[in-house]
Structures are given as C-alpha cells and as structure tokens.
Image (tube, coloured by chain):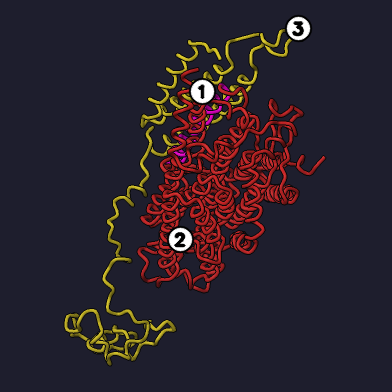
C-alpha cells in the first residue's frame, strides 16, 4: 500500500499537539486537544484509502483501478459528524462549569480526596468493644446497674439539688438512678434496652 | 424470510420511540406511555429472536441490500440475542423505576423531559453494538450509546455531575479515538472492516501486525469495559449521576465493552498471544477493584468499585479461551448485568428512605422497611457468590475452567477470584451491618428522613419538604422485578448454562458466524494457532519471534 507522506506528517503533528493539549488542566485546551485528535484520526483513515483517484461510480467507462477508495471517505464523514456532536456537547458542559465554578479547570473529586484522607482506623469496626454487649436487661446482673456501667458511679457528677421531672421534683440521687439502664421506672422495650 | 430479519427492529424501535417521545416533550404522561410501550415491544421482539436461535444457529441480516463484505450486516446468534434480551429487560425495569421516581417527585420541568428520548437512544446504541457484524458499525453503536450517556450523566447540570461528566466525556472520547485509529489500521492492513471477512483476512497477516491491531482494539474496549488499569474513570464518574442512570450504566455500558472484547478475542484474533497479559489484567482488576470498594463509605461508590472488580471475572473467563471458560464468562455477563443494576436501584431506594447513600449516616433500615432490606440482601449475597445464587454458579464455572486449564497463572486467578468473592462479601456485609442492622441512634448525623416516624416508612413524608412518597410502589415494584429476574437466573441456570456453552463453542468454532455472513462456501481459517496458545506463553513468544523474523526476511 502506498501512502501520501504529507498526510502522514500532518497527522503526526496533529496527534502530537492533540496529546499535549489533552494533558492540560484547562478544559478549553482539553477540548482543542480532542478536536485535533479527531482530525488526525480522520487523516489516518484518509491515508488508508491510498493515493487520490477518480470519483468512484461516476461513469461506467472508468477503469476500476483508477477509482479512489470510497469507503474511508464514508467513514470520515461519519466520524466528523460524531466529533461535531461531541464537541458541541463539550462546549456546553465547559460553559456550564464556568457558570457554576467560575473556572475553566478540571476539578478534583472531593469524595475521593476525603476517602484518601480517612485514617485506616474505623470507629465502628476497630474500636474496643464496650462492656455492655448484652441485649438483655441489665437488671439481671446488678440491682442498680452500678457494677456493669462503663464508668463507675462515683465518677458521675451527682447533682445535689432536687431535679424537676414532669409535674414533680425528685431527689438528685433518684434522678441519677433514673438515667441508668435497668431502672425500675423505665419500661423495657421489645429489643431489651430501656427507652 | 426468517424471524432473524426482524433484528434491525431492535435498533429501529427504540430510535422511533426516541423521536416520538421527543415530539411529546410537553406531555409527560404520553411520553411515559410511549417509551414504556416501545421498550416492551423491543423486549418482546428480542425474546422471539432468542427463541429462534435458542438451539443454536447464526443468521446474518444485510442492511440496505448491500452484500456482506461491503455492506453492513447485523448478526443474530445465541450470545448476541442473550445479551439483547438481558439488556432490554434490565433497561425496561430501570425505565419503569425512573418514571416512578419522576411521578413521585412530580417533576414536569423541562430538563428532565429529555430523559425519555435520550434513554431510548442509549438502548438503541446498546442493541446496535450487540448486533453489529461490522467493526465500524460497532463504533457507531458505541458512539450512539456514549453520546446518549453523556447527556444522562450530566442530567440537571449540577456541579458534581458536570465535574464527573467532564472526566467521563474526555475519557470516553479518547477511547473512541483509539478505537477509530484501530479501525483505520485494520482497514489499512486488510482492506475490510466486516468482522467475518476480517476473521479470514487477519489470519493472513504477519504476527507483529496482528499483535499491534489486537492490542489497539483491546485497549480501546478495555477503557469502555473498565479493565484495570483503564478503570480509573468509572468510580469517579458513575456515583454522581441520578440513581436510575447509574444503574443502567453499571449494568449495560461496561458489558458492551466486555462483549466487544469477547468478539475480538474469539472471532478476530482467536488463540492469540495476549491471553497471559489479559489474565494478569483480570487478576489486577478483581483484586484492586475490590480493595477500592472496601475503603468506601458511600454505597454508590462502593458498588462502582465492585462493578470494576467483577469485570475481572469476565475477562478471566475470556482470557482462558477454552469453551468452559468462555461459557462461564457468557453466563457471568448475563448474571452481572442483572445483579449490579438491581443493587444500584436498591441504593436509589435506600437514598430515598434514609436520606443519604453514605453508610455512616444510615442505620436501622431493616426495621424501618423490611422489604427494602430483603431487596438489598438477595442481590448483595448474589453478587458475593453465596451458594444457591447465580453469582456462585458463574464463579464456580470460572473456577472449574481455571482448574481445567491448570497453568500456574490460572491457579493464581482461581485463588484471586475466591479472595475477591470473600472480600465482596465483606464489603456488602459492612453496608448491611451499618445501614440495615445497627440501631438508628448509632448513625452519625442521620438525615431527618431516617428518623421519621416508623409508621410512615412505606409511604412516609420527607420532613420539611412538601409531601413526597418515600418508597413509591412503581420504584419498589420495578426493583423487585429485577431482583426476581436475578433469582430466576439462578433457577433457570441449567438451560442458561447450556445456551452459554453452545454459544461459547460456536464462537470458538467460528465457522457458523463466518458462513452465515459470507455464504456457505466461505473458507474458515484453521485454528492451529489456538492450540499452541493453550500450551503456554513461551511457545507463543517463540512463534511470535519466528514470524517477525519471517516478516523481516520478506
């Protein structure tokens, strides 16, 4: 197969410029790069048709060997239409990026950055399992829940003053006991925990 | 005149539907009716096509009366019909889901009314790619579906979608340019782009040129199929799109790439020397993909990574180029389209009910909506490959084929596949534990919707906004339909595996395809190369060097 050297040189230059441009961060340059790549490819397809010849199927007298190969031209026509549509769409979203972010640059994926910055320690999966793992009411273990609490009862700040609760006031000690699981005043929910 | 001559309708009907729905753009109810009706009709037609080739057989349809090596042909065989039926069933379910979502949210606004025409064009592009028997027509099919997908990806034009859309468009265009370059080089080398004709003519080329063309095509399809290391774009762009759009992309677009890879490997370059690199790529796709999934806290992103990871299984089956491996790959593609799509649809429902798709912010959904939990649990276990389900059967088929092949690399892949399966189970179990199983109090910054009263769980109202049905019946119904289809793949796995096996043998044989397109008397090149490929890569390297030398001497 014989090819036109000029076509090949131009094609190579277009590919080089196109690849350089799509590696930029500016979207407009990326678009220009894509257009150059598409056109370079069109030239490549044209080159596969060999040297230029007569228009095919024009007259019955023409020798078939003198015809130009019509298929690459049909392919180029299709690919021009497709790249036209894609270019129009790209222009649309570049404009939209400008309207939204006031910048003509490719933006980072924030969620990706967040996941990358997340420490490998996961509070849910890797934390030490807390003492209270039972679904059963804790009244079975200790009468007032003092023995099974995560923090000893002495550490808890005990309010001295009576606490108003609903319509009445109750003593501070009783109020603390009220907060504990297994309190006599708390209804046991179907899952076992107090409400 | 046989039934197969109706095959062009699989492409024409959705395009007709797109035109009609575009004209009905102001009448959303008529639009919905037309698009669902035409897609159902397409599905029915494709079921008929599948029934006509169920017992084997390949038929070619010449478009516009031009004879095969010059004109465009559509080829109907078991593999393409199976893909058509599965993809149309899935896209119909997603369409119903999307219209349900649209009706529930009451959006009659202008930008979303382009959804129906664009969606139907996407379906037409997918059908065209599956049916095409011509390399350039395959390119056109890809472009139709990609251009439609650009629009769907950036639907609504919000900031994150535009950002993701830019990456997606640029990567897709680059892969399309690579494909086009490959087509130009194929045409320059052989003077034809008809795939059956190429199967004969490519065999006459010297090994160096063949390898170059082969690599070009595989890279172009590898980007579309998201094979590692060409998968970087997928988890970045898919999760931002609306739930039904992500679902249909996850189900169909990557599988079209896999389909094109299968055709390249079996029809154009049978038993070529690239099986070893493909196997390594498959292993890396599986393992790297699933490790990415484990790091995610957003369900959509997690599923995008599992999608990449499970593409590795299909490439594994393909790279073995044995009948057993290919059959398992065909079955796995059908299984994975259904399962991955239903998981994304369920995620859309989770997002509606829980107000977020981040597992940190979700909790207690199993109690709030047991149906939702069931809808997630079944496909999730199916994806992970828990025994009764089709995911297990597909993986089992692949493992058996790998053990049958018996090379060290194949054993490595079998182990890698099992590991990936277990890690998939871990990934979906984490979602299950957090979003469904733990108490609502344990969620970090839960959305007010999640904490809404339990009595509203089925048809509850979004807090603070105007009344919105949280789990509309249409959306739940279509998801349920797809989950049931996934279970049906398990129940009917026997006949399905039989068809997959037959189609794999037909694809490896190649004579049916070539003779259906080019006529009874077309010469079918021998598969002598194939046997040496199975015996290991060292031999192939020798063959490659030998032919390169020969080429030099000429």
Q: Mark number for residue A61?
A: 3
Q: Earlier in the sequence, mark 1 or mark 3?
A: 1
SS majority, magenta: helix
User: Which of these two is toward me, A51 or B427?
Assistant: A51
Q: Identify the residue under disc 1.
A: A41
Q: Depth-wise, is mark 1 or mark 3 nearer the camera?
A: 3
Task: State how far apart marks 1 and 3 are (Cα).
Answer: 33 Å
Spot occupied by residue B218 in the image (x, y as percentages of width and height): 50, 36
Residue B374 lies left or right of residue A119; in this view the side is right
State the extent of the magenta-drawn residues as a range: B160-188
User: Image height check: is A112 above or below A39?
Assistant: below
Q: Depth-wise, is mark 2 or mark 1 nearer the camera?
A: 1
Q: Identify the residue under disc 2.
A: B355
Question: Chain A is which colour?
Answer: yellow
| Marks 1, 3 in one chain | yes
Spot occupied by residue B519 in the image (x, y as percentages of width and height): 74, 32
The crowd level at tag 2 (other Cα within 10 Å; few <14, some 14-19, many 20+) is: many
Q: Is residue B163 magenta?
A: yes
Task: State how far apart marks 2 and 1 are (Cα).
Answer: 47 Å
Chain assigned red: B
Task: State how far apart marks 3 and 2 are (Cα).
Answer: 74 Å
Chain of the residue under the numbered disc 3 shown in the image: A
Does the image show residue B42?
Answer: yes
């Amino acid at each position: 197969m014989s090819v036109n050297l000029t076509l090949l040189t131009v094609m190579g230059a277009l590919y080089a410029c196109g690849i350089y441009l799509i590696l930029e961060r500016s979207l407009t340059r990326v678009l220009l790069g894509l257009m150059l790549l598409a056109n370079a490819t069109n030239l490549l397809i044209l080159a596969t048709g060999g040297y230029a010849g007569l228009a095919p199927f024009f007259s019955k007298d023409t020798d078939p060997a003198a015809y130009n190969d019509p298929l690459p031209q049909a392919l180029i026509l299709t690919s021009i239409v497709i790249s036209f549509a894609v270019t129009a769409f790209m222009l649309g979203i570049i404009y939209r990026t400008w309207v939204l972010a006031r910048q003509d640059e490719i933006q980072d994926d924030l969620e990706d950055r967040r996941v990358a910055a997340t420490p490998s320690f996961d509070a849910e999966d890797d934390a030490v399992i807390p003492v209270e793992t039972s679904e059963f009411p804790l009244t079975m273990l200790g009468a007032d829940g003092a023995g099974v609490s995560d923090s000893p009862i002495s550490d808890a700040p005990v309010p001295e003053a009576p606490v108003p609760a609903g319509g009445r006031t109750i003593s501070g000690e009783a109020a603390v006991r009220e907060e504990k699981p297994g309190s006599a005043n708390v209804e046991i929910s179907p899952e076992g925990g107090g409400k | 005149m046989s039934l197969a001559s109706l095959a062009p309708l699989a492409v024409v009907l959705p395009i007709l539907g797109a035109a009609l729905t575009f004209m009905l753009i102001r009448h959303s109810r008529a639009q919905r009716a037309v698009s669902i009706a035409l897609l159902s009709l397409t599905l029915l037609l494709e079921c008929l096509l599948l029934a006509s080739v169920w017992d084997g057989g390949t038929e070619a349809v010449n478009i516009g009366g031009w004879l095969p090596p010059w004109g465009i042909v559509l080829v109907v065989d078991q593999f393409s019909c199976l893909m058509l039926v599965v993809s149309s069933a899935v896209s119909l379910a997603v369409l119903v889901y999307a219209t349900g979502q649209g009706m529930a949210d009451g959006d009659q606004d202008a930008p979303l009314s382009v959804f129906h025409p664009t969606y139907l064009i996407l379906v037409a592009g997918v059908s065209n790619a599956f049916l095409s028997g011509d390399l350039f027509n395959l390119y056109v099919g890809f472009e139709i579906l990609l251009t439609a997908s650009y629009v769907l990806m950036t639907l609504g034009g919000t900031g994150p979608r535009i950002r993701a859309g830019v990456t997606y468009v640029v990567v897709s265009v680059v892969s399309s340019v690579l494909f086009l370059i490959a087509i130009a080089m194929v045409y320059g080398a052989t003077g034809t782009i008809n795939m059956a004709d190429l199967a004969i003519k490519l065999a006459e080329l010297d090994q160096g040129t063949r390898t170059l063309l082969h690599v070009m095509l595989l890279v172009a399809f590898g980007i579309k199929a998201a094979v590692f290391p060409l998968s970087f774009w997928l988890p970045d762009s898919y999760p931002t799109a609306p739930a039904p759009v992500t679902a249909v992309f996850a189900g169909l677009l990557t599988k079209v790439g896999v389909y094109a890879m299968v055709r390249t490997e079996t029809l154009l370059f049978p038993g070529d020397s690239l099986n070893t690199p493909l196997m390594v790529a498959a292993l890396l796709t599986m393992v790297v993909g699933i490790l990415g999934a484990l790091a995610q806290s957003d369900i959509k992103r997690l599923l995008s990574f599992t999608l990449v990871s499970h593409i590795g299984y299909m490439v594994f089956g393909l790279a073995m180029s044995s009948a057993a491996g290919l059959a398992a790959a065909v079955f796995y593609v059908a299984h994975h389209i259904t399962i991955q799509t239903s998981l994304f649809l369920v995620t859309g429902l989770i997002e509606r009910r829980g107000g977020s798709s981040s597992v940190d912010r979700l909790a207690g959904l199993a109690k709030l909506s047991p149906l939702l939990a069931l809808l997630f649990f079944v496909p999730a276990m199916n994806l992970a490959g828990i025994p009764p389900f089709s995911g297990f059967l597909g993986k089992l088929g692949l493992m058996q084929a790998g053990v049958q092949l018996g090379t060290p690399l194949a054993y490595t892949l079998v182990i890698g596949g099992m590991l990936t399966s277990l890690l998939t189970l871990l990934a979906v179990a984490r979602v299950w534990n957090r979003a469904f199983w733990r108490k609502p109090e344990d969620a970090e910054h839960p959305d007010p919707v999640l904490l809404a009263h339990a009595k509203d769980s089925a048809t509850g109202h979004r807090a603070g906004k105007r009344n919105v049905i949280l789990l509309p019946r249409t959306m739940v119904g279509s998801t349920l339909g797809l989950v049931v289809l996934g279970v049906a793949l398990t129940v009917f796995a026997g006949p399905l595996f039989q068809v997959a096996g037959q189609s794999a043998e037909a694809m490896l044989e190649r004579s049916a395809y070539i003779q259906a397109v080019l006529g009874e008397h077309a010469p079918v090149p021998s598969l002598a190369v194939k046997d040496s490929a199975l015996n290991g890569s060292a031999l192939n390297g020798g063959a490659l060097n030998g032919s390169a030398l020969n080429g030099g001497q000429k």
